[in-house]
Image: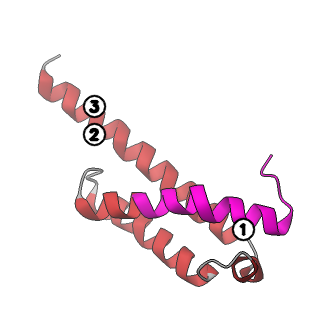
Amino acid sequence: MNVFDLQGLVLYVAFFIALGVKGFALVTAIGFQAEAYTAASKLTKVTWCAFLALGLVAQLISMNPLGLINIVFLVVAFVYLADVRPALQQVTGRTGR
């Protein structure tokens, strides 16, 4: 195994991890009611779902997890998961367990 094989493997794993994070964020965003976003003082459901769906599509089209667009949309997914989703869970009473 040379260094290029290792680099390809790392990028392959990073691609699927990023794809999973973006997919999970989109599925959970779709699962909340639109009123919960307003009650949590966050952007609308349509806005979050659009950002997350665009990120997922960009990931599937470019196939490069280290591209600028994919990194930006990965940050969007992490912001959703770290800030918006817990606020939505608190508003709706879901614990996520």
Q: The residue tagged with tag 3: helix, strand or loop?
A: helix
Q: Are marks 3 and 2 in contact (CB under 8 Å)?
A: yes
Q: Is residue 36 left or right of residue 20?
A: right
Is residue 86 highlighted in magenta? yes
Secondary structure type for disc 2 = helix
- What's the amino acid at mark 1? Gly
Any mark on residue 9, and which?
Answer: 3
Residue range of the region highlighted in magenta in the rendering: 75-97
Q: Of circles 1 and 3, which is in front?
A: 1
Residue 10 horizontal/vertical position (percent): 29, 33
For badge 2, the amino acid type reads: Leu
Real-space Cα distance between discs 2 and 1?
30 Å
Quadrant for the N terminus, please. top left
Q: Given contact means CB atoms under 8 Å apart, are the residues at marks 1 and 3 in contact? A: no
Alpha carbons under labels 1 and 3: distance apart = 33 Å
Q: In the image, residue 63 lies at what x, y percent?
A: 28, 54
Residue 31's disc is: 1
Residue beneath the point at 73% across and 67% down: 88
Q: Amino acid at mark 3?
A: Leu
**Vertical side of 38 occupied by 95: above or below:** above
- Say left or right for 1 vs 63: left
Question: Mark 2 — residue?
Answer: 11
Give the mark nearer the N terminus: 1 vs 3.
3
